[in-house]
Image (spheres, rainbow, N blue to C red):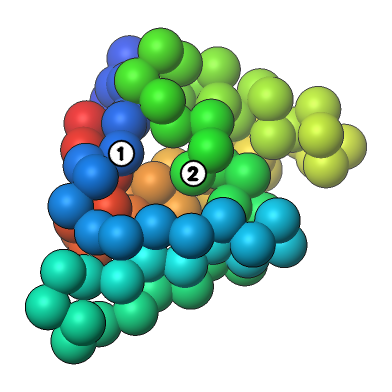
Amino acid sequence: MLPDHARPRPTRTHHEKDLSGEYLFYDHGGDQVHVLNGTAREIYLLCDGSRTLDAIARAIAETYAVGEATSRTDVSAVISELVERGLLAV
C-alpha cells in the first residue's frame, strides 16, 4: 500500500497520447502498449507530483460522487499498478 503522503508523478519513460476518453502509453522500443480507461486517465492526470494520494482520492470522490474510503482504495490500486508498470513514480 502506498503512503498517504506519496506524491505520484509521471516517469515520462514512455511515449504518451491523451485521447480524451483514454490515455495511451508506448514504450520506446514499441514492444508494449498500455491503455488507461477514462477513470484511470483522470487519476493519472492528477498525478503531477503536487498532490498527495489523499488529495487525488478526494478529487476523484468528488468527481464521481463516491465515498472517500472507496475512492482511496480504488485510487491506491490504480496508482500502485501504474507504478508497477513504470508509468508513475512515488
State the image coordinates of residue 39 (x, y, percent, origin top left).
67, 54
> In terms of image quadrants, where is residue 7?
top left
Is 43 placed left or right of 51 in the picture? right
State the count of labels. 2
Crowdedness near tag 1: few (<14), some (14–19) or many (≥20) residues, C-alpha within 10 Å:
some
Task: Assign a secondary structure to mark 1.
Answer: strand
Q: Nearer the viewer, residue 71 or 46?
A: 46
Circles 1 and 2 in contact, beta carbons < 8 Å? yes
Q: Going by the image, does 1 lie left or right of 47?
A: left
Q: Residues within 10 Å of mark 2 (few under 14, many from 20)?
A: many
On the image, the x and y values in percent for residue 54 come to: 50, 21
Whether residue 20 is visible here, answered yes or no, is yes
* Residue at (12% x, 78% y) in the render: 29
Q: Residue furthest right?
A: 65
User: Who's the residue at 31% across and 31% down the image?
Assistant: 9
Q: Is residue 34 above or below residue 69?
A: below
Amino acid at dot 1: Pro
- Going by the numbered disc 2, the residue's amino acid type is Tyr
- The residue under label 1 is 10
Q: For the point 45% across and 54% down, which residue is it? A: 78
Residue 41 in the figure: left or right of residue 35: right
The x and y percentages for residue 1 are 28, 41
Of 57 and 41, which appears nearest the observer?
A: 41
Mark linked to residue 44: 2
Separation (CA) of disc 1 from disc 2: 8 Å
Please tell me whether residue 5 is drawn above or below residue 13 in the rendered image: above
Location of residue 20 by image quarter: bottom right
